Image (cartoon, rainbow, N blue to C red):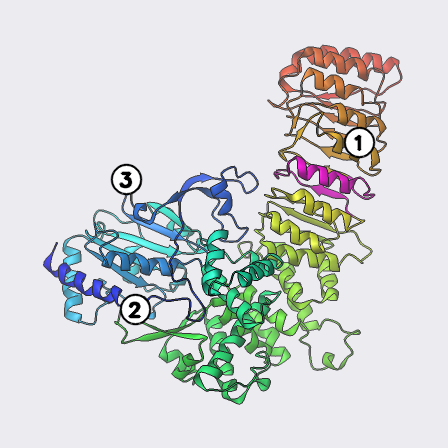
Amino acid sequence: MNHKLSSYRDYLQSLYRAQVSTSATQWPPVPTKKIFKLAMIQKEEIQRGRIDDEFVRLTIRGKIDDILLQKTPVNLTNIFSEIGDRRNFVLIEGAPGSGKSTLALHICQEWAKRKLFQEFDIAILVKLRDPLVREAITISDLLPCTNKAMANETETAIMSLYGKGVLWVLDGWDELSSDLPRDSIINKLIRPDMSRESPLHESAVIVTSRPSSSAKLHPRVSSRVEVLGFTPHELQQYFKECLKGDSQAVQTLLERIRENPVVEGSCYLPLNASIVVNCFLSDNHSLPTSNHGIFTSLVQSSLKRYLQDRLGKTTPVGDITSPDSLPSEIRTQTIQMCQLAYHGIEQNKATFTDGDLAALRIPKEISNVGLLQTVPSIISNGHLVYYCFLHLSIQELLAAIHISLMSPKQQISVFQKLFGSPRFSAVFQFYAGITKLRTSRPILSLLPRFLCPVPATVFDLVRKIVKTEKEKKYREQPLLLSLINCLYEAEDSRLCVFVANLLNHNLDLDYTTMNPIDCLSVGYFVSACSNTSNGFTLSLSNCSIDDQGCKFLARGLCKCPNSNNDIPTAGIHIAEIIENTSSISKLNLSYNAIGNNGLCTLCEALSTNTSLKTLNLANCSLTISDDNGAALYQLLNTNNSLEYLDLSGNTVTSCRHIAAGLAVNKTLRRLHLDDCELTDQSIEELSTGLINKIKTLDIGGIWGNDSITEDGMKTLARHLTTHCSELTRLYIPDHLISCSMTVFRDANKERKRNGLPEINYVY
């Protein structure tokens, strides 16, 4: 090892070892035992609705940061092992709060303890959110070191070795300033591909980022790793630690979480779990029911701790959305934090310097309140500090409070300016929870609410959101879904009706990733519109709705779902939807692993439904046999509205129950059984039921019905010569094209003699 690097190595080891580990006693509480579950991301893509690997399935949460690629478990020690001849450039991805920054520090601490990555002489941790990073031009500018001479010597040594033996741990790619100077050292480290001519091409790099911000790095990295967060068992262990082993309290907390889609879908993230357990402890073992409520509770708890621990006061905190109601000891600080939060949103900043605080005339002591962290810059060895809020959502909530205190005209003006910005949706959703979207012009505010339930200014903003979504200007930001979330926070059914009219009663969220909270909001929105006289179409194809999401969609949904998602046991919850509505007309559940149990429950609910016309159960992992086909018979026998039934892509070993149902059904017009592994016996059984008014029959397919022979076609043809008076289209398996031409040509002649219409045979 170069002796100059040896000196710097000793310095770094001492620096990392000095970092204090957190504990469950700090606030918000964090795990004492660090848990890092990692997955190596492969190149093979996966489809949300067809995930066979159980490990991969557990990593898909229905969120914007889902990584839809094959994955395998990997230990931290092995993340460089499968790189081969490529440069050591590893991208570590994970949702906000998954522990990426904790992992970055952990890597350097384990290296300092000589337990990890000892093939590297030095490991350099750079927090990309640090304001000094933006100004860094040379390597020495990035080095955590107070001695400028040592930094310069280390830079010379690194350059002379082309970076060999150096591990750069760059934490927070998604927090890096987007307007880096052209000569920034970060541009040389990451942005361009490293060529052999680069003076740093032998160095190794680990970068952390949230997946939604890392696409530009994918072509350059040698491997990608995902931080997975807590498993259910690990979450329970974490709660047990935070609740000091109180098993009863742990079970109560878990029960509250299962009842609450707002928190259940995000507790796998360590940071979110810490916030939830804090709310539970602070609010008499109860949890808020909205995102706004959760973070409001967190802020109030922080202010309460500040009053008690710092000032020795037991004064009630009051309503943080109304500063006048706050105790005088924290009123000014709260207003200043809201101002700083809004400044950050306006400037798209998550970190602040002393200069930012001075420009807003905010004292540094504001960080004592507990919502704003003082973070020493590791580059300056603590001689420079910067500030950031405990959680981005806290900043967004406080910014929304600041906006809500402006005049009505200013409020709408602010959102017009923020429209399309990265954090518009989050701030607007908090704003909806605070104001209930009742901001009004001065004159309109004098009118009774029943005359003007929604102010014109909000009308204008909502119109803009809907118009933008229709034009798909911000498809990467699902503004329409964010608006639906806002309507749930606002709890204003009349505004829901207004939005439904703007959408022409057609809510299309296809290919929009939805978590359980989104599903609850969509359910509320559609149910709020259920009393209108117009029909309503809801399309949720490929939205990554899981079983839990479907459960909460069912709580409020009273109109037509058109879904195509990964719902392993959805039958029960979809049945609940159907039982709660009398106006559903189309139900598309194709490409969902519903299974036979789900089918039975679904058919039972549909048996008494009087509005369903279309049911698509294609590729739903069904096996229809003599033993379990009775559910379909019950559906066809008792349902008096079904016109279209698609069972394609499932396994049908017996058509006996289907045929019995067809024989008594009066309404079915189209039946699809293509690629169902039908046999000649299946065709014979099916033929006995073809006496109704069915118009289209599909028994075709490329390979799924290849067991049908010419004899099966002859059996069907003989039956059709005297039955199915309205059948006009028949789809035939591809492998029987040649023989079927003669068989069905003769059958059509017989039908004509019997006064029946000719059948169009499709191959």
Q: Residues within 10 Å of mark 2 (few under 14, many from 20)?
A: some
Horizontal side of residue 676 vs 361, given as left or right: right
Name the residue tied to disc 1. 669
Q: Is residue 756 above or below residue 135?
A: above
- Work out how far the residue at label 3 is from the one at label 2, CA to CA, in angstroms: 34 Å
Residue 14 in the image: state x and y as whole percent. 21, 65
Which is closer to the viewer, label 2 or label 1? Answer: 1
Q: Is residue 96 something that shows in the picture?
A: no
Q: Residue at x 56, y 64 (%)?
A: 425
Q: Amino acid at mark 1?
A: Arg
Q: Which residues are magenta?
A: 584-613
Q: Residue furthest right?
A: 755
Split into 4 quadrants, where in the image is the C terminus? top right
Q: Is residue 753 something that shows in the picture?
A: yes
Residue toward you, 235 or 389: 235
Residue 469 in the image: state x and y as whole percent. 61, 56
State which quadrant residue 475 falls in: bottom right
Q: Residue at x 30, y 56 (%)?
A: 107
Asked which secondary structure carries label 2, the reply is helix
Q: Is residue 609 magenta?
A: yes
Asked which secondary structure carries label 1, the reply is loop
Name the residue tied to disc 3. 84
Q: Is residue 303 above or below residue 503?
A: below
Label at residue 135: 2
Q: Earlier in the sequence, mark 1 or mark 3?
A: 3
- Work out how far the residue at label 2 is from the one at label 1, CA to CA, in angstroms: 70 Å
Residue 487 in the image: state x and y as whole percent. 66, 64
Q: Is residue 191 magenta?
A: no
Residue 24 in the image: state x and y as whole percent. 42, 66
Q: Earlier in the sequence, mark 3 or mark 2?
A: 3
